[in-house]
Each structure stands twice: as C-alpha cells, then as structure tokens.
Image (cartoon, rainbow, N blue to C red):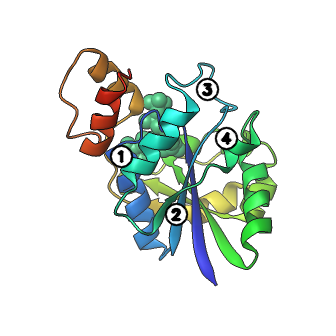
C-alpha cells in the first residue's frame, strides 16, 4: 500500500524548516508522497495569513519544484471555511482509497493535539508522525490519543526557523536565502510581499 503523508500549515511563506521536517519524516517512515496542504482558515491562529491564498499556493508550489515526492494539495482552500484536519483526512481517504495515511506534525502540536476536532478520529484515519529533537521529548498529555502520539515520536534534527521570523526579516530587508528557497524569495520580491 502506498504511504502518503499530509503536512498542513499556513506556509506564509514555506521555508527550509518545513522542507527539512518533511524530508526527515518521509525518509524515516518511508513515505511515497507528502502532500503539502496550505490551510484556508486555521482553527488555532487568531491572525489571518499576511498574504492571499493564491500567493501561499504559488509560493508552496514553487518551493516544492524538483521534489517529486512532495506535492501541493489545495483541498483545504478549495473547501473553504475553517480547515479541520479530520475533514481533510476523510476527504483524502475517500479520494485516494487504498493508501496508508500519515500525518506530519512538529513537537509544537503535542500539548494541544488532543483538543483538535475529533482527535481520536484523526489518529484512526492517519498515523501521526512527529518530528522531535531526540533529547527533548515533551510530555504528552493524558488523553485517548496519547498512545498514538507516543508511538509517532520521531527523533530528528530540527531547523530553528519560523515564518514569523522570515516575515520580520523580510520587512527589514534582511538576508533570507539561508531560510527560504531562492525561487520563493524571487516570487516574494516580484510580488512585493511582506
Ligand atoms: P508562523 O511563524 O507564521 O506561525 P510557522 O513557521 O510555524 O509559521 P506553519 O506554516 O504555521 O509555519 O507551520 C506548519 C507546520 O510546520 C506546523 O506544524 C509547524 O509546527 C511546523 N513547523 C514550522 N516551522 C518548523 C520548523 N522549523 N521545523 C519543523 N517544523 C516546523
């Protein structure tokens, strides 16, 4: 069975931290494909993204060029409204039929994951795999999804990069080529973003 990973995010913009996580987790768990799915409205973030959905789609598409196992997935933007992972996984399961689904997460998600909409159903639909720095594995809150999260802990190098830092650096015209693929920086510059 094909192993497909879902990697959701705001991708405002996509950066090397995202790509690094996806490469490491897909190697470790031998995934055939990772779907990068830009969120429409995140249930967690209070502020909307800084740029339009179209720009986030284009930047994500560009950042994945030349990485055949990584693909853009626009299902959440097409669906509109608040993007719940459980709905996305259900839709993927129906579309893709006999595949094994994985959900790519970072350690940041561990403390609140059990409060995500239908968290128990999420881990039933997809195996969570969580990039964590080996020496700093966090405590996982007690809940019906605790065991699934525990089993998904995947010690891997993590790059200290966030889209917030990138947006700040771009607004100050600071160098960002070590944080974001050049092809995305070119897009940002030509569309005057951030
Ligand atoms: P922002 O700074 O705007 O909150 P972000 O850099 O956290 O953005 P998102 O698009 O919100 O990026 O992240 C999507 C997913 O990728 C989230 O699960 C997030 O925890 C994870 N992630 C973000 N940055 C990194 C990184 N440097 N290494 C590993 N995972 C990351």
- Disc 4 designates what residue? 77
The kind of secondary structure element at disc 4 is helix
In depth, the one of 188 and 98 nearer the eye is 188
Q: Residue at x 75, y 67 (%)?
A: 95
Tag shown at residue 17: 1
Mark 1 or 4 closer to N-term?
1
- Disc 3 designates what residue? 45
Residue depth check, mark 1 versus mark 4: number of the one nearer the observer: 4
Q: Residues within 10 Å of mark 3 (few under 14, many from 20)?
A: few
- Given contact means CB atoms under 8 Å apart, are the residues at marks 1 and 3 in contact? no
Mark 2 or 4 closer to N-term?
2
x, y (%) of residue 42?
65, 33
- Disc 2 designates what residue? 34
- Given contact means CB atoms under 8 Å apart, are the residues at marks 1 and 4 in contact? no
> Alpha carbon of mark 1 to alpha carbon of mark 4: how far?
22 Å
Q: Residue at x 31, y 46 (%)?
A: 159
> Alpha carbon of mark 2 to alpha carbon of mark 1: how far?
15 Å
The quadrant in which the C terminus is found is top left
Reply above or below: 117 against 172: below
x, y (%) of residue 133?
38, 52
Residue depth check, mark 2 versus mark 1: number of the one nearer the observer: 2
Q: Tag count in the figure?
A: 4
Mark 4 or 3 closer to N-term?
3
Mark 1 or 3 closer to N-term?
1
Reply above or below: 110 against 153: above
- Given contact means CB atoms under 8 Å apart, are the residues at marks 2 and 1 in contact? no
Q: Residues within 10 Å of mark 1 (few under 14, many from 20)?
A: some
């Amino acid at each position: 069975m094909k192993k497909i990973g879902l990697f959701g995010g705001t991708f405002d913009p996509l950066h090397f931290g995202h790509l690094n996580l996806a490469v490491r987790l897909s190697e470790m768990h031998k995934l055939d494909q990772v779907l990068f799915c830009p969120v429409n409205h995140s249930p967690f973030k209070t502020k909307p993204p800084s740029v339009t959905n179209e720009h986030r789609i284009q930047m994500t598409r560009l950042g994945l060029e030349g990485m055949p196992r990584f693909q853009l997935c626009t299902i959440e933007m097409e669906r509109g409204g608040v993007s719940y992972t459980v709905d996305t996984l259900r839709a993927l399961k129906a579309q893709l039929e006999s595949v094994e689904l994985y959900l790519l997460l970072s350690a940041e998600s561990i403390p609140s994951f059990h409060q995500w909409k239908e968290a128990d159903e999420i881990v039933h639909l997809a195996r969570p795999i969580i990039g964590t720095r080996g020496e700093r594995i966090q405590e996982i809150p007690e809940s019906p999804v605790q065991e699934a999260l525990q089993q998904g802990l995947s010690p891997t190098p993590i790059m200290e990069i966030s889209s917030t830092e990138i947006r700040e650096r771009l607004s100050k015209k600071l160098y960002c080529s070590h944080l974001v693929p050049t092809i995305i920086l070119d897009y940002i510059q030509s569309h005057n973003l951030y």
